[in-house]
Amino acid sequence: MRKFWFIFMILGCFSAQAQIRVSGKINDGKNNPVAGASITIKNSYDGATSDSTGTFSFQTTEKGDQILEISIIGYQSHIQKLSISGQPIILNIILKELVTELKAVVISAGSFEASDKNKGAVLNAIDIVTTPSANGDVTSAFKTLPGTQQVGESEGLFVRGGSATESKIYMDGNLVNNFFYSSTPGIATRGRFNPFLFKGTVFSTGGYSALYGQALSSALILESKDLPERTEADLAISVIGLGGGIQHLARDKRSSWGISYNYTNLWLAFKFNKYKQDFFTIPVYHQGDANFRIKTRNGGFVKYYGYISSNVTGFRNQDIDSLSMKDAFSINNLNTYQTISWKDRIGKGWRINTGISFSTNKDDIINELQDAGNQKQVITSPSFYAFKNFRLNNRAVYAQARLVLEKKLKGLTAIRFGSDYFYSEERSTYTLYDGTRFPETVKDHLFSLFTETDLYLTNDLAAKIGGRLEHSDLMNKWNLAPRLSVAYKFRDNSQASFAYGLFYQNPERKYLPAVAQLNYSRAAHYILQYQKITGQRSFRVEAFLKKYRDLYKTSVSVTGREVAANNNGYGDARGVELFWRDKKTFKDVDYWVSYSYLDTKRDFLNFPTAITPSFAANHTASLVVKKFVLPWKTGFNLSYNFASGRPYYRIAYDNTTARNIITDAGKTINYNSMSFSVNYLPGLGKKNAKAFTVWVLGINNVLGQNQVFNYNYNNDGSRKEAVTPPSKRFIFLGCFISFGIDRTQEAINNNL
Amino acid sequence: MKNKIIMKKAILFVSVILLSAVSFAQSERYLSAMKNNLAAIDTSFRNPASLVSLSNNFERIANAEKSQWLPYYYAAYCQVNAGYVDADKSRSDAYADKASALIAKADSLAPKNSEISCIKSMIASCHMMVNPMQRYMEYGQEVSSFMDEAMELDPANPRPYLLKGQGLKYTPEQFGGGCSTAKPVLQTSLDKYGAFTPLSELHPNWGKGRVEQLLQECK
């Protein structure tokens, strides 16, 4: 019987328990209450959630030694022993904030990001194709951001007083040579790659990461897409050509492959647009590419991308020295690029990012002096006429291998290090009017080691510290480039950043081989930035100072070529830049404005002294406005680019003083250009349509404003001629059709 | 000898009683705690702080019980709804991440469950709503694939149809949404609610009122 009493006593315990009150306050250590934290007595139902003042209170029936756990996302969990006896318990708890991507400051000095995912991105991937002045060219959209020049006579990004060769372009970490189609005199060429290949872009106007080198001014870092959303086929028909492609996604959604081919022929465009040049070979481009992407078990990717293209073009300009004669220029280019990369987690917080790339480039250039009847003329007196007849045959091979290892430490802190090796072999044969050949080969092995740490001290303070060690066989020297960025977040979520770095670069290929052993050119960047991004609005202001030293000076070789001679050049650049983007103020209207002020002088190449180079304008500004009208299924995009006049010079060798002098100089008129584009999506809302069509109409320089980029001088300087765009306006009409997918949702979300 | 057997029997008897009493008390406690919190969901629906507090309650129950998927399920459900109703969209990702962690635990206890797929779809759309413009590519696909998965796992479940109909209703007509396309889906959902009986009083049974309200708005 006693035993049964015992049972009843035990049972009785369940119903007659004393309750003890546990209460308290939670703060973050900076006297801010933490709301929404869960307070729990471990392995029991008892607990509470802190309110907006951080206060909590609950009753518990637990007894004795217990474990109290307090947790909330974004803070380190707090665990403590709790001894529950008869007395109410009052607690004061401090939770330590965790450093998380959501809250942490973004290290952004000097860089603009175009991405759909990352916080702090100022552009989306789609902005690159809907900016009318860009014409779907990857780099051109960045010319509407501060820091870049509106240079129309040659391709590339001219950043903060730097020349286009000071900007380098990387795809998945690998340097891309010949990113643009080969240069043609006075006409800017486009980038080779389709903007839809990339999911994210970081455009650095200075102070960029130690993972990249060999660019004095700027790095454009492109990240290719992962798997496509689904299998699809595309067809493009436009006034400039035809194209088609297939992207195939495996059923298990773990791999994909794709191929595409594009044929561009400007014949039709020439019928619509009047050109200044007389094209005897209408530009024709063939371009094919292939890719595959495999998702690995750990969520990493193996990606391959291969590209081949060939193009021809040939045109005549009036010869500047002889009004009755013409210069006929023609180029035949063949380019290949292949890259394979592997990015993955390899356990214990380590990540690997490795890749190899291989590319070749072949240019066959012929320049002839022709008479009114387009017949070749060889004139040897005066002698400078003779050099107007030449051939240039370039053959280049590039290979690169790269390995980066990254270890995630606490919070967002990470350390990464790695190495890359870059081989280049560039052969060129220059043939004079009389058949004399000057073959030359420039080879280089460029080896680098780099390391970088992302240091997140708190959510409000972060630093990126890195260094890069480089050795080029050509320079036969090591260089060490330290890089540093610091960012601090204020209470109102705005932030200030600072960046410093040293950057080294080899001389441009066209000035090699040099007449003497050279050293690297060097630039030091100092950047100060303030930025505030709230959901729909972004504002940033940036000031910079850039100091150049050891820039190349050139001299003229016996064949009339300009070659690098010494490192006695120098220069500096300083400026202030503003950027404002707003999607909120005007309903359904998205616009951005940028303004740059630049003050720069440099002594390089054949300059007699430090002068403002002809590619630098003091004031540059852009406005881009986009509006999508839903009932019309049409998007309207407008961009306006402005630049103040740029200086131009006639630099000539003075025989009496035996040095270069400026014999004439001036400033071009201001640059103004308004471009407009319309996208019409008739298939919007047609749910089960088999094809989705986008019509695009684009007009560059709608107002037909006069644009002068520079002036060319004749041999004795008695005459100068304006360098202007090849045609006043360019009108583009195209139709892009995707089969097998419904893009309705995408269109909605991209435009609402 | 006999005594020993009696003793053994007595001990066994006592243990059985004790154990069943304990487990009875446990499940009674579980049932009443779950019911109390379930009842509170409706009254706290517009208030993100109350939903978070409820989610925490469910999570506490789930962690103490260890083998029940329903408290994790409701913890995730409350968390993702808090994400929907909180006006500050900068917090949505945190709500959705927390809900993801909770529903993953429910999923490991009850794999291939239509109700769990519904919550996963809701979590993806919570992420997407932060900035549908930029995030459609990433999350839009997930929203609909989890919806399809839920329909496939249990064709009788009315909730994936509710989610689908609701999504369509708020899509502009020009894009193939609006009431005209949403109505048949919502009607299917309502029909399924008519035939639906939850497995127990604790199993998911929400959404009927919402379907009726949406259909009313589409009249």
Image (tube, rainbow, N blue to C red):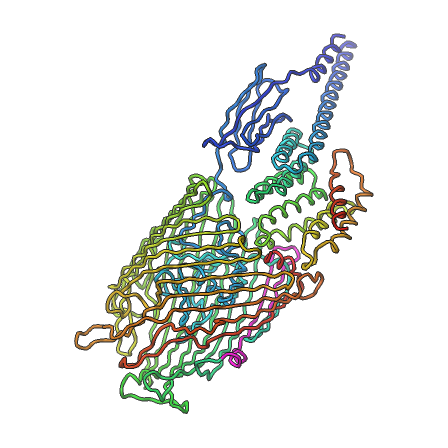
Give the residue at x 49% y 71%: A700
Task: Between residue A713 and residue A507, name the one nearer to us.
Answer: A713
Task: List x then y, in percent, for residue A121.
Answer: 49, 53
Task: Between residue A178 and residue A379, name the one nearer to us.
Answer: A379
Task: List x then y, in percent, for residue B8.
Answer: 75, 14
Looking at the image, which residue sits at the far right? B195
Task: List x then y, in percent, for residue A325.
Answer: 36, 88
The answer to whether residue A214 shows anywhere in this view is no
Looking at the image, which residue sits at the far left? A656
The answer to whether residue A649 shows anywhere in this view is yes
Range of magenta residues: A244-273
Is residue A245 shown in magenta?
yes
Q: Quadrant of the N terminus of chain A?
A: top right
Res. A145 image quadrant:
bottom left
Give the residue at x 77% y 16%: B13
Looking at the image, which residue sits at the far top? A2
Task: Between residue A484 and residue A475, name the one nearer to us.
Answer: A484
Left or right: B10 as drawn, with respect to A530: right
Looking at the image, which residue sits at the far front? A586
Q: In the rendered image of this protein, does residue A60 appear above or below residue A687?
A: above
Left or right: B157 as drawn, with respect to A514: right
Q: In the rendered image of this protein, does residue A559 appear above or below residue A34?
A: below
Give the residue at x 74% y 55%: B181
